[in-house]
Structures are given as C-alpha cells and as structure tokens.
Amino acid sequence: MKKTFIAAWLFLWAINAFAATPLKTVIEIYTTVSQGAHSIEETAQIAQKEGINALVFTDRDILKWEYGLHPLQNILKKSLQQESILSFGPDKYLAEIDKAQKNHPQLLLIPGTESAPFYSWQGAPWAHHFGMYDWDKHLLAIGMDKKEDYQDLPVIGNTKALRTKYNIYRMWPLAAIVVLLLFILLRCYSYTDTHGRPLCKPTHYHLILLFLSIIFAVNNYPFRDLSFDQYNKKNERQARQNYIDYVNRHNGLTFWAHPEASNTGFYNGIYFNTQPHQDELLFYHNYTGYCILYDGYELTGKPGGLWDDMLQDFCRGRRATPVWAIGGSSIERNDYRAAFKDLHNGVFCKNNRQDFMRALREGKMYIARGANSLAFTLTEFSLENNTLKIKGKSSTGKNLTITLIKYGKIIDSYEIASDFSLEIPVVKSAGKSYYRIEIRGEGLHVITNPVFTK
C-alpha cells in the first residue's frame, strides 16, 4: 500500500513538474495558405530548429473586399480577393496542420485565424478621402478545430454567414415581374380585332420596366437581410461582439491584435485608413485578451494603462472575465527565425491542445521579448498565503530587474541574478486585487499575466 502511495505521489509530482515548465509558444503566424512566406510544414521545421515548443497559426480567414454602387450594389461592384483559409479550404487548412503535427510530435500545433469582422466604406467615390476604414481592427480566433467553424465565421466578405431572415420588401422585383408579364400577356392575347390580330401590343416602356425588374431581382437575390454590411457603420460594434460570441460558442478564444497600430495608405488604388484603436477594448466583453506585444504596450499595457483599467473592472465585478495578455508575432514575410527569437509566450500547460487552450483561457502565460528572450524561462509566478513566489532563470548570466505592480501601480522593484527564486510577503487586500510583474534585462522584456487575490 505504501509503495502504491509513493508511486502515485511521484506520478503526480512528475505531472506538476512538467506542467510547471512553460511551452515556448509563438502566436500569430501566417503561412502560404494566406499571406505567409512558408508553408505550415516549413514553419514547423523552422520552429523546431529554433527551440520553439508550440505554434499558433492564424492565417487570414477571408481576404475579399467589395464596393458596389447603390442601389445595385451586388451587380455594379468592384471586388478584390486574395488567398485565405476560405479560398484554400478550411478542411485542407486543418488537415495540413494535423499532418504537420504528426510529422513533429514534439511540437504542439494549434489552428487559428486572424479576422477583420467589420470594415466600412466612407465618403463618396469621387471624394478625396473616400476609402475603406477600420479593416485593420483585427481579432485572433484560436483553437477552433472544425471546418464549419471557419466556413460560418460572421465577417464581412463571408456573405453566406451573415444572411438572416427573408425580407419581403426585397422581393418587390419578383412581384413587378409577375405583374408586367401578366399585363403583357393579357394585352397581347386577350384582345383581338375582327381578323384575330392582337390589340394593344406591349410598348418598349413595358419591356424596359420588365428588364429593370429582372436586374433588381438578380441584385436582391436571395432576398435576405444581412446582419451587417460594409455600407452602414452603425452596426460596427455589434458585428465585432457577434464575432467574439461566435468564437466562444465554437470553443475558441479571441484576442485583439495590435490595438495601438495604425495603417493608412493606398492599395491597388484604394485608400484605406485604420487608426490606433486601443479604446475599443473597453466596449466589448467576453473576449479572452489582447496582444500586448507588438503594438499594445505603450498606451494599454504599461502600468496604469487601459489593461489595468480592465483588470480593475474585473475586480469590481464590472467584467465577467479578466482580460489576459499575449504576444502576437504577426509573422508574415519577414525572417521567421529572427521573429521566433524576438517574441514568444511561455504557456504553462502540457503538450496537448486541450490543456493549451485551458492555460490560455485561464491566463497561465507570460510574454518574453528581445534578443535574449529564448534564453529566459519563468518557472513560477504564484500567490499563496499572502506570499508571492517568483522563480526563473536566464542562461545569459546577466542580472535582471523585477518590477512589482499591484492594482495598476508600481509598488517595488528588485535587482536579481539570472537564476532567481523570490518569496515576497504581501499585505492582504480588503477587496479583490491582483499582482503582475515585468522583468527587464539586456535584450529581455518579460510581462506576466496577473495573479488575483482571493
């Protein structure tokens, strides 16, 4: 009996020890499925050589933009489309990831996508600043593993997924066609002279009206409303919240990408404009988190920034879930090896998809950036019995600085060696609170997610 107990204890200890070693994970990678320079298999090979433990692929779900002239927006339109998951085939995309997973069992490969749920055309086509606005307000959806999850994503461009109920008012061309046909047929064949010749033949006006009715019928087909479209900005927030809710229902996780980035210019002669939009994060709920790096630190992630505001809202009961931070590499056509070395996430989980998703959902990860980021490992950051435990090491041998942040305010800093283990007593909070830390050193910037007081 004693031997059985010891064996069971050693087994559990081994699991905990494994779980305490974070998987070095790169999130937000594009491949040749959409806008990337390498295939899924090639990307996995590069990651394995660079010492990466997990990859999250986020190829674009759909790259299709349309502008149509009212009232025939579905006929008098210009379209531009590029390669994406939907054009490649969601089933093939997921199969390629599964195939690479079998070829690299030591790597954990997670499917995902980057989406632009909403954009809008603003201005008149002949106006100076006419163009496409807010397309770069992107969201990452991580972990959905069925082809239908991608086929039915509610984003502009994926029209089938946005159709709602039939609209009787859109069917007016059909009624007009029936009336005109009956009128023409009756006038042609119901009235004749004494010699049997038809009277009151239809004029060219009747034929013109019939032709126009057919054109509008084609334009209005399939006679259904859309949840939202690119011509009406008023449903913008509803569209993005709808996307977040959809991903949640399909067992995925959502993260805002690059909220502090701007993107303006011309592409294929079309003006586009997206301004920094970190404030948008305040208006949505039940998303998992956001990319603090890159383009999410200066205004949002710094101590006392918007991230702390949202964490405090969670502590006060104004948010149902915390907002977690991740690092989004946005690897597209740059040097993949250099990108892997510059930014990764340490995810505290086992080497399987289910536990990886649990860890991201619970905020069990930190972000490490810099030339020496892969040489660093944080093995523990926990709060127990009013004691913060912080353990980690860096193979560079360089000293580090830990900044301790409580409820959005810097309360202390510590100079530590490259191999460190700290136990910091903290004062029990009157209400729900949290701690998080940043670690800096030569070629290193680490940001942890918060641990909350009970």
Image (cartoon, rainbow, N blue to C red):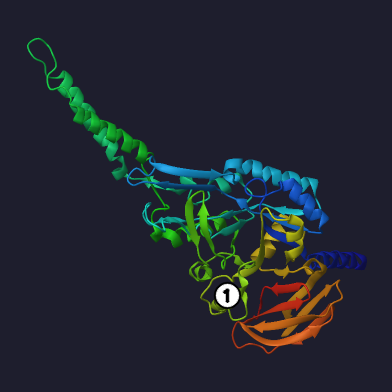
Judge whether 192 appears above or below 10 on screen.
above
* Nearer to the camera, 254 or 320: 254
Whether residue 384 sits left or right of residue 142 in the image: it is right
Provide residue 7's location: percent of width, then percent of height.
Answer: 89, 64
Which residue is farthest right?
3
Quarter where residue 103 is shown: top right
Q: Secondary structure at mark 1?
A: helix
Judge whether 439 appears above or below 115 on screen.
below
* Nearer to the camera, 80 or 367: 80
Judge whether 123 appears above or below 152 on screen.
below
Provide residue 205's location: percent of width, then percent of height.
Answer: 19, 31
Quarter holding the N terminus is: bottom right
Quarter holding the C terminus is: bottom right
Tag 1 residue: 299
Q: Residue at x 75, y 54 (%)?
A: 108
Whether residue 362 sits left or right of residue 161 in the image: it is right
Q: Residue at x 36, y 46 (%)?
A: 69
Q: How many marks?
A: 1
Provide residue 78's location: percent of width, then percent of height.
Answer: 44, 43
Q: Amino acid at mark 1?
A: Leu
Q: Residue at x 36, y 36 (%)?
A: 218
Which residue is farthest left?
194
Q: Residue at x 71, y 88 (%)?
A: 412
Provide residue 52's location: percent of width, then percent of height.
Answer: 78, 59
